[in-house]
Image: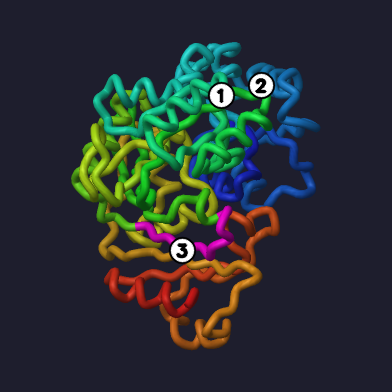
Amino acid sequence: MNFVFISPAYPVTCRLFCDRLHQMGVRVLGIGDVPYDQLDGRLWGALTEYYYVSSLEDYDQVYRACAFFIHKYGRIDWLESLNEYWLPTDARLRTDFNIAVGTREDGIGNLVRKSSMKKIFVEAGIPTARQHIVSDEPAGRAFAEAAGYPVIVKPDIGVGANGARKLSSAEELAAFYRELPDEPYVMEEFLGGDICTYDAILDSRCEPLFESMCTYAPVLDTVQENENIHFYTTANVPDRLRELGRRTAKAFGADRRFVHFEFIKIDRDYEGIGKAGDFAAMEVNMRPAGGHDPDMMNYAQSIDVFRIYAEMVTSDRRQMPEGDEKYYCAYAARKDGHAFAHTHEEIVARYGRDLVLQEEMPPIDWPAMGRYVYMARFREKEEMDRYFAFVLG
């Protein structure tokens, strides 16, 4: 099997996906803009060949790289980046080279445009916030008055919380229209509550081979308020979230993928959506959760999601058994500018046996992910809550 991996060096978890694919006998062929001498040693061991391009934005270079691989190794069976930013490039390459597995150009809009996602949620009967495609100020004002302030505005095509803003008044809405970017935006009804994700590896029938949930505060609030970061991952997916996650996978035709679907666990009743404690869909991400989340899934369930993904690719089934031990895997990250009751040394002394990772994040990640990370796992949620209070209090 020939698997072309776009940008295998970033995010860093990609090297582990490549490694497990290689272990399963897959020929992994990398295309990336990281120079050869800067590639991780494990990645070198997993790749049969690496084709360097000066820019992954230059489609002609990437196209020629694929053509070279086909000439040397035969047809491409699978092509992925596992990176949201490159999904349109992935789709274009699959179309141009007639690659059977994965979304092609004619279907990529539903996976990257928030307005298209919203239509699918509504058609599938999945609860979700009301949305307005931003046009002129009078239409936006009418939507905001009907939905009630605050409202959220964000790019129709965008990664994470980039470009998103919360508008809490008519004055803030007017200011948004005075500075309206050229790119398409959507405006949505604001739903209060924590984000709960449905993470899964799906087979060719859109059936889950693995499922997990991550719970955290909205990233937009965390960044705008400069709050410290804390969230956790668990195998204990609520039945309702599991049902909605599986229904979402079917609605979007998300087959043979590692997915990261975002839902809000609403904190009060919303007419037409549900009661406090219910779930409402936010958006779909047709790639694994970012950062250390895949590692956290492994720690939480005593498994190897990278291996499960490789098993899905090679056999369309899961061979890895369930882990014997289940945990809550907790992520706590401190930001600069905050006073803390406990020092680094005190954290290590108290939770050293529970910590599975501690590190300083790259500066680019400090606003959204914090500067210094402490990752630990616990059998009981109450233990985890005490840990969060100790590290971030």
Report if residue 102 is visible in the image.
no
The residue singled out by tag 1 in the image is: 137
Q: Secondary structure at mark 2?
A: helix
**What residue is at 46 percent from the left and 56 percent from the top?**
295
Image-quadrant location for residue 36: top right
Q: Earlier in the sequence, mark 3 or mark 1?
A: 1
In the rendered image, the vertical position of residue 280 relative to residue 136, given as above or below: below
Q: Secondary structure at mark 1?
A: helix
Mark 3 packing: few (<14 Cα in 10 Å), some, or many (20+)?
many
Estimate the spatial distance between the alpha carbons at disc 3 and disc 1, rounded to whole Å: 37 Å
Q: Position of residue 270 (x, y in %)?
A: 27, 40
**What residue is at 68 percent from the left and 17 percent from the top?**
67
Which label lies toward us, 3 or 1?
Answer: 1
Report if residue 30 is visible in the image.
yes
The residue singled out by tag 2 in the image is: 66
Estimate the spatial distance between the alpha carbons at disc 2 and disc 1, rounded to whole Å: 46 Å
- Residue 230's disc number: 3
Which residues fall within the magenta stretch?
A: 223-233
